[in-house]
Structures are given as C-alpha cells and as structure tokens.
C-alpha cells in the first residue's frame, strides 16, 4: 500500500473504472460481513491472553459458520473500494504512484 492506504495492485484502473467500483463492486457485501469483526474493528485494543487464545477462535469460527468460508475468501481476495481505512482498499482515484 502507499501513503494513502491504497493497494496499488488494485488501483491500476482508469478514474472512470474506479468510480464505478466505488458503488457497484461485487465484493461490497462480502467485505461488509467481515469488516468490523476481522478487518477494521473500531474497538480494537491490544489482546489479552483470554481474547487471543479463546474468544478470537470462538468469534472466528462463529463468523465462518454463519457467513461462510467462501464469503470470507471473496472479501479478502476481491478487495474493496469504499472503506479507505480498511484492508485491501483499491482507492477511488488513480494514485500518483501508478501514473
């Protein structure tokens, strides 16, 4: 990623293509299913022993069972174009690094 948290591998598109992806990217729903729990937890804090070795596994298994492995894999591999603080962010304009 660059200084704007943009994954440059997902940013090599025209500005028109990027603007279309901001609103219509097929992966939006998959990313949203896991965003707060896995990718961009707004209440993130240093893990305690109990959380690191117990609750995180419970939480992970629960999400995988209820949302599905395919949805998690699609969210991670497909990237996203709307959450600029999230992971796998492709940006909404062509970055200077790619020009």
Image (cartoon, grey):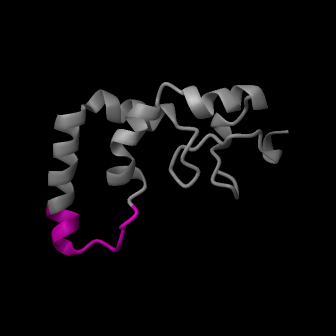
Q: Position of residue 1 (x, y in %)?
A: 64, 50
Comparing 75 with 82, the one in front is: 82
> Number of labelled discs?
0
Residue at horizontal 36 percent and vertical 67 percent from the top:
43
The correct choice, above or below, for 38 with respect to 46 in the image is above
- Residue at image position (23%, 75%) is 48
Q: Picture coordinates of residue 79 (x, y %)? A: 52, 36
Image point 40% across, 30% down: which residue? 74
Quarter of the image where the C terminus is located: top right
Residue 73: x %, y % from top left = 37, 32
Q: Is residue 92 visible?
A: yes
Horizontal side of 88 relative to 46 (left or right) equals right
Magenta residues span 42-54
> In the shown orientation, is residue 17 left or right of residue 70?
right
Q: Is residue 6 magenta?
A: no
Query: Image point 53% across, 43% down: which residue?
Result: 88
Q: Position of residue 77 (x, y in %)?
A: 46, 33
Q: Is residue 14 visible?
A: no
Q: Quadrant of residue 50?
A: bottom left
Identity of the residue furthest to the front in this view: 23
Q: Left or right of 70: which side holds 86?
A: right
Q: Is residue 29 above or below residue 62?
A: above
């Amino acid at each position: 990623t660059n200084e704007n948290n943009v994954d440059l591998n997902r940013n090599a598109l025209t500005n028109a293509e990027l603007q279309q992806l901001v609103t219509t990217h097929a992966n939006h729903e998959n990313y949203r299913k896991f965003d707060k729990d896995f990718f961009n937890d707004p209440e993130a804090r240093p893990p305690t022993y109990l959380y690191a070795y117990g609750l995180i596994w419970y939480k992970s298994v629960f999400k995988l069972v209820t949302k599905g492995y395919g949805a998690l894999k699609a969210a991670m591999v497909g990237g996203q174009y709307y959450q600029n603080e999230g992971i796998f962010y492709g940006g909404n304009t062509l970055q200077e690094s790619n020009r």
